[in-house]
Amino acid sequence: MTGEAGPLAGQVALVTGASRGIGRAIALELARQGADIGLLQRGDAADVVDAIRALGRRAAIAQVDLADPTAAEQAVEHLADDLGRLDVAVCNAGMVQRQAALEVSLADWQRVVDVNLVSSFAVARTVARRFVAQGQGGGCIVFTASVLAFQGGWTVSSYAASKAGVANLARALANEWAPLGIRVNAVAPGYVENEQTAPLRANAERFAAISSRIPAGRWGTDADVAATVAFLVSPAAAYIHGSVLTVDGGWLGR
């Protein structure tokens, strides 16, 4: 497969947190849509690189701890230089700390905010500066928020706070950057069946309670979220700016 066809043919997309889960699915879906992919995350993603190249696309990787925003900015620059340009960025990397607010340490609370929110801003701003410097019509940025951007959750105060910040960051940056030709949006996944939610699914009572509230009758998949991101960065979404699109099987409407 040459990978030349598709709405993103000839473009370069950066995806953070692409070694597994939603990020991995996003990276592979954008590659299927024709984009070359830059991967930025803390862990190894050699298998993702191999899968992207098997689709006929170029892939490059930068390993960095996203809790360090300066290192994240430098990693974006490295990937942009390596791949020649940037057209799309998906700020997906995130972590969750499940602990009661009365007990969680400030250091642990701060790290979640740094990884989920501060690094998202650092990456997005570095990418946007690249878009402007390239001078070829801007680009697209998508953040991964969560339905907990709209709800408080339970024993996940740092995660809920950071994801609410991510959702409003997408709106704020869309206001500033739309005149520059840069589209900024976010997806807000609901309960997705992957490694991150394994503890919830292992708790029979919690799993049943959550499942019973999802109108679609099932938990989401990584592919559900990836398809939505692919739409938001496609020409079909050209007039969508500052949207936080829920991918939750109807959870928030219940």
Image (tube, rainbow, N blue to C red):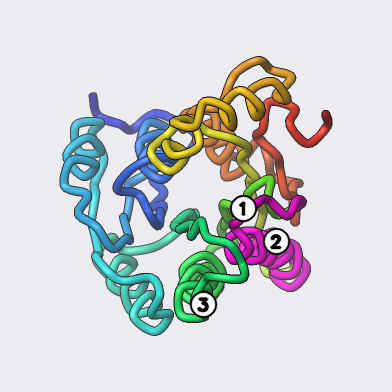
Q: Position of residue 195 (x, y in %)?
A: 38, 38
Q: Is residue 185 above or below residue 194?
A: below
Type of amino acid under label 1: Ala
Mark whose residue sits in front, 1 or 3: 3
Assess whether mark 1 and mark 2 are in contact (beta carbons under 8 angstroms).
yes
Determine the CA span between mark 2 and mark 1.
7 Å
The residue that disc 2 covers is 164
| 147 relative to 13 in the view: left or right | right
State the extent of the magenta-drawn residues as a range.
150-178
**Label 3: element kind:** helix
| 230 relative to 5 in the view: left or right | right
The residue that disc 3 covers is 110
Q: Residue at x 37, y 75 (%)?
A: 72
Q: Position of residue 176 (x, y in %)?
A: 74, 73
The residue that disc 1 covers is 145
First-in-chain label (2 vs 1): 1
Q: Residue at x 22, y 35 (%)?
A: 51
First-in-chain label (1 vs 3): 3
Crowding near the residue tagged with mark 1, few <14, some 14–19, many ≥20 C-alpha atoms within 10 Å: many
Q: Is residue 145 above or below residue 77?
A: above
**Label 1: element kind:** loop
